[in-house]
Image (spheres, helix red, strand yellow):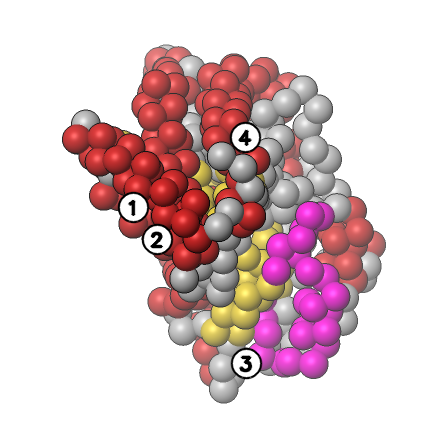
Amino acid sequence: MSDLRSLSKEELIVLYSKLEKDFQRIKDKNLSLDMSRGKPSPEQLDLSLDLLTISSDSLHVLEEIDVRNYGSLDGLLETKQLFAEILQVNTSEVIIGGNSSLNMMYDTVSRALLHGVIDSNIPWAKEEKVKFLCPSPGYDRHFAICELLNIEMITIEMLDDGPDMDKIEELVKEDKYIKGIWCIPKYSNPDGTTYSDEVVDRLAKMKTKAPDFKVFWDDAYTVHHLTDKPSQLKNMLQACKDAGNPNRVFIFASTSKITFPGSGVSAMASSEENIHFIKKQLVIQTIGPDKINQLRHVHFLKDLENIEQHMKKQAEIIKPKFDMVTTILESQLSHLNIASWSNPKGGYFISLNTLDDCAKETVKLAAEAGVTLTNAGATFPYGKDPRDRNIRIAPTFPSLTELKTAIEVLCVCIKMASIKKLLK
Ligand code: PLP
């Protein structure tokens, strides 16, 4: 097979009928493979089992706090120190949350709608409308928060070094209803992009019509490297301080994909002023998060150096999976000129672009063949990919054997969807 776009209609029809036979053979195998969400594999989870064996003798910490009892609204000092080291901020700039950073993001947006943020004149929800910029492809759950909370989303194109800053600057300087932007600045979901220093600086510096514009900096994959040469992300909180906008950013992270997703520890970081402002409301929301789990994590993870070692073990398990996906895509598709894909240096996803108008059809065919992928469009606001071409591949959970089958099936489906489109 050569470049599909150079084939005649007749040649494409012959090829399609061959692929249909392959497709039928795959269907006859009654596969049931789920590649829809980025979850660690059981082998990765096994790496954190020692987390569960903390002795009851160690259930007390600095400042003599008894972790078994109520208290510590913003988390244990040791947990704050750990996240401060991970996020390169001061301990006084950290609030520890519960088991999910997404939950902290949801709460932060909700509080802004109900009460405003530190520099708001009125609560966001009292404005005529509220808009968020959504670099896309991006994380579907960020977009779902906006949809549920009635925040209008504006799609911003992701470029090689981060979101399209020219567009962002142009929009925020004119529109007072644009109150926020979602960013996954390192090994982004799903592109694997790390924002350049220039993008970080421009986000920190740009003039915004809304005095209370906020950057939601979801640093979910900050220690999730796949190579020995980690990408470097410029410190956003420092950049905001240097630009004279110290209160502009809310940073989020968690141990979800370091230890146990759903049973990890989350954190947010921001200027001391913002932290103080948030804590006044947080004290009404909760008496405090789970300190026993925090302590378990502190004992197990210890410090950034130890976390880096732990993440190397994770990478040893998942890197071969990423390599397997890109090798199959390369051998099956690169000569056909019908798809392109990312080659991430970290994070949890490979982002694949088909020809325009082929992603939905590909995902539908894959489902018929027993391979569940993330819904086409999910990586865009309102689930609508304007070019219907992006597919998010989550290689970490399946075994290598399952993954090989799933990606081979995916390649057949991409070829079929592409030929259908070319024949139109
Ligand atoms: N942020 C991003 C970018 C993610 O990809 C994910 C999970 O896939 C999360 C947040 C969820 O994090 P948590 O488990 O801390 O809520």
Is residue 73 at least partly visible in the picture? no
- The residue located at (54%, 80%) in the rendering is 122
Q: Earlier in the sequence, mark 2 or mark 4?
A: 4
Q: Quadrant of the C terminus?
A: bottom left
- Sequence-earlier tag: 3 or 1: 3
Q: Quick check: marks 1 and 2 in contact, CB under 8 Å? A: yes
Is any atom of residue 243 visible in this view?
yes
Near-viewer residue (305 or 387): 387
- The residue sitting at the bottom extreme is 128
Mark 3 or 2: the one toward you = 2
Residue 86 shown left or right of residue 21 in the figure? right
Identify which amino acid the numbered label 2 is placed on: Glu
Q: Residues within 10 Å of mark 4 (few under 14, many from 20)?
A: some
- Residue type, label 1: Leu
Label 4 and label 3: CA atoms lie apart by 53 Å
Labels 3 and 2: the sequence-earlier one: 3
Q: Are marks 3 and 2 in contact (CB under 8 Å)?
A: no
Q: Secondary structure at mark 4?
A: helix
> Which residue is disc 1 drawn over?
365
> Which quarter of the figure has residue 136?
bottom right
Q: Secondary structure at mark 3?
A: loop
Asked if the residue at tag 4 contacts the one at tag 1, i.e. Cβ–Cβ closer than 8 Å, the answer is no
Q: Is mark 2 within 8 Å of ligand 1?
A: no
Reading the image, the residue beneath label 4 is 330
- Residue 291 in the image, given as x and y percentages of width and height: 41, 33
Closer to us: mark 4 or mark 3?
A: 4
Of mark 1 and mark 4, the one earlier in the sequence is 4
What's the magenta region? 157-180
Q: Which residue is mark 2?
A: 361
Question: What is the CA distance from the residue labelled 1 to the residue labelled 2?
Answer: 6 Å
Camera-nearest residue between 306 and 405: 405
